[in-house]
Amino acid sequence: NEEIKELSYYPNRSSLAYINLYHLQGVSNFVRTTLRHKNFMLGWEFIIKLNLTNENICYNSDGLSIAQFFEQHFAIHNLSQTVIDILNENELNKNSVVELLGKTIYNDLPLTELTISDDGDVVPYTNSNKPTIQTFIDEVAKTNTVLEQLYFLGLDDTETIINKGLISAADALQFILEKKLVLTPTDKDMIVMQHEINYQIGATEYKNTSTLLVKGKDSIHTAMAKTVGLPLGIAAKLILQQKITMVGVQLPTTPSIYLPVLEELSTHGINFNEKIEIMKN
């Protein structure tokens, strides 16, 4: 899909329980993950490094703006100057690199083969202990992305007051995320799910990729609401129609439940597209 150029993933809790659930005993590798945009992963990693997920109660949020919370938090953890100044300094360094690149006589060499000497000159990259200019610019780009994300969360927001009494950094972060990440009326969400199964028949190795992509209509008729609500509603209807006759608490992993539900879901545009590739013949 053109809208999804690249996604990152991370393990979603323990995957082991799903091996028995889906009768996949004997598989050599099994992992259940969550997909996210790579900049989300970068930002969340930085949030953890900034100790913003700390659950110790140490802030009186009454009358405290988001900007003041960040200021207090960075001060408590000796991060006030470290975070902002270093990121801003990197931005200046990036400009210096661009300026130096414009003057270099090594324009025929790629950035991966250039570095900056101790004297500030652009020189061919020969010392393995020094990062290349490309590596440096990549790191700068990351920190600038994080800085942009922090401002989005309210690094300079003096108007939004938390007013939650005594809270932890994690409580403050939850409040901030609920305020800043709420969908606006014109926002649309998107659900992406992908299963990748590698298997072998005889000497031939295959890969089956099954992909689900559902887009929301607006901030009310979301893809999340659609994919969560419709299966339950369809199952309830099928029970009333006595097309599902199982009783008691059941997981939807039984064919008599999921097959008719999936069939009706496809009429609502919710279906998986499968692609089988021969990896080795």
Image (tube, rainbow, N blue to C red):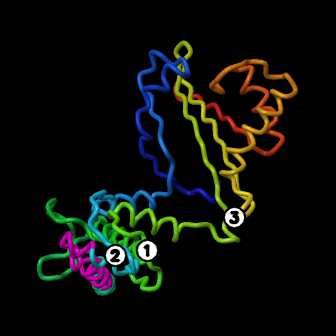
Residue 120 picture location, percent across and down: 17, 82
Residue 174 picture location, percent across and down: 44, 62
Q: Is residue 206 left or right of residue 154?
A: right
Work out whether residue 115 or residue 255 is closer to the camera in this orientation and state it.
255
Give the farthest residue toward the right.
Answer: 241
Q: Which corner quadrant of the image does residue 133 belong to?
A: bottom left
Q: Which corner quadrant of the image does residue 281 belong to?
A: top right
Query: Of callouts 2 and 1, which one flags the residue occurring earlier in the amino acid sequence?
Result: 2
195 within the magenta span:
no
According to the picture, the residue beneath numbered tag 1 turns out to be 162
Q: How many marks?
A: 3
Q: CA distance from mark 1 to mark 3?
A: 24 Å
Foreground: disc 2 or disc 1: 1
Q: Is residue 105 visible?
A: no
80 within the magenta span:
yes
According to the picture, the residue beneath numbered tag 3 turns out to be 219
Q: CA distance from mark 2 to mark 1?
A: 9 Å
Q: Secondary structure at mark 3?
A: loop
- Residue at image point 70% right, 71% down: 186
Q: Amino acid at mark 3?
A: Ser
Give the farthest residue toward the left.
Answer: 118
Dot label at residue 69: 2
How packed mark 3 is, by other alpha carbons closer than 10 Å (few <14, some 14-19, many 20 or more), is: some
Q: Is residue 269 left or right of residue 80?
A: right
Q: Is residue 151 above or below residue 166?
A: below
